[in-house]
Image (cartoon, helix red, strand yellow):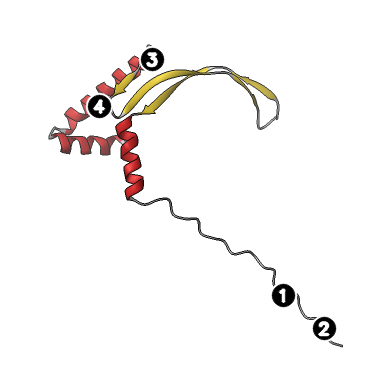
Amino acid sequence: MNKATLIDTLAAKANLSKKQVEDLLDAFIQATMDTIKQGGEVTLTGFGTFSARVRKGREGINPRTKAAISIPPTLVVKFKAGKVLKDTLKDHQHSAGAKPAPVPIAPITPPPAPAAPSA
């Protein structure tokens, strides 16, 4: 689902205009980004929590030159799913059935050797 589809869906469910929903969604996104940028968290009970965390620096390898490089620590966004969201996904998984069993692959048998030419 992209932003336009989300706006259409929310407008229909909340009986609001698409413009109202778009303005509200933009305000939510901006408020979430501002809060996370300031080191806070945005918690939507049951759905999940958006926060920022520092991913520690590490050593890496440049794939082109194979030279060792130092990757500095960086600030990344983290999302932790809430209980209701997790339970919804679990229920969906169980109602849809377990993962399908892997299809067995028959062993590859070499073709029979050609018969020796008779002289």
Q: Say above or below: 95 vs 29.
A: below
* Residue named by callout 4: 25
How far from the left and from the top, in percent, is residue 28? Answer: 26, 22
**Pointer 3 with pointer 4, Cβ within 8 A:** no
Residue type, numbered disc 3: Lys
The alpha-carbon separation of the residues under discs 1 and 4 comes to: 67 Å
Q: Say above or below: 3 vs 34.
A: below
Nearer mark to the viewer, of 2 and 4? 2
Residue type, numbered disc 4: Leu
Label 2 or label 1, whichever comes before in sequence order: 1
Secondary structure beneath label 4:
helix
Res 44 → quadrant: top left
* Residue named by callout 3: 37
Nearer mark to the viewer, of 1 and 4? 1
Label 3 or label 2, whichever comes before in sequence order: 3
Which residue does the image show at 32% across and 34% down from the upper left?
A: 85
Nearer mark to the viewer, of 1 and 3? 1
How far from the left and from the top, in percent, is residue 2? Answer: 32, 37
* Residue named by callout 1: 112
Secondary structure beneath label 3:
helix
Res 72 seen here: yes
Res 112 → quadrant: bottom right
**Which disc, if any, is residue 117?**
2
Residue closer to the observer: 114 or 62: 114
Crowd band around label 1 with a 10 angstrom C-alpha radius: few (<14), some (14–19), many (20+): few
The alpha-carbon separation of the residues under discs 1 and 3 comes to: 68 Å
How far from the left and from the top, in percent, is residue 59? Answer: 64, 22
Residue type, numbered disc 1: Pro
Q: From the image, which quarter does the N terminus lie in? A: top left
The alpha-carbon separation of the residues under discs 3 and 2 comes to: 80 Å
The alpha-carbon separation of the residues under discs 2 and 1 comes to: 15 Å
Label 2 or label 4, whichever comes before in sequence order: 4
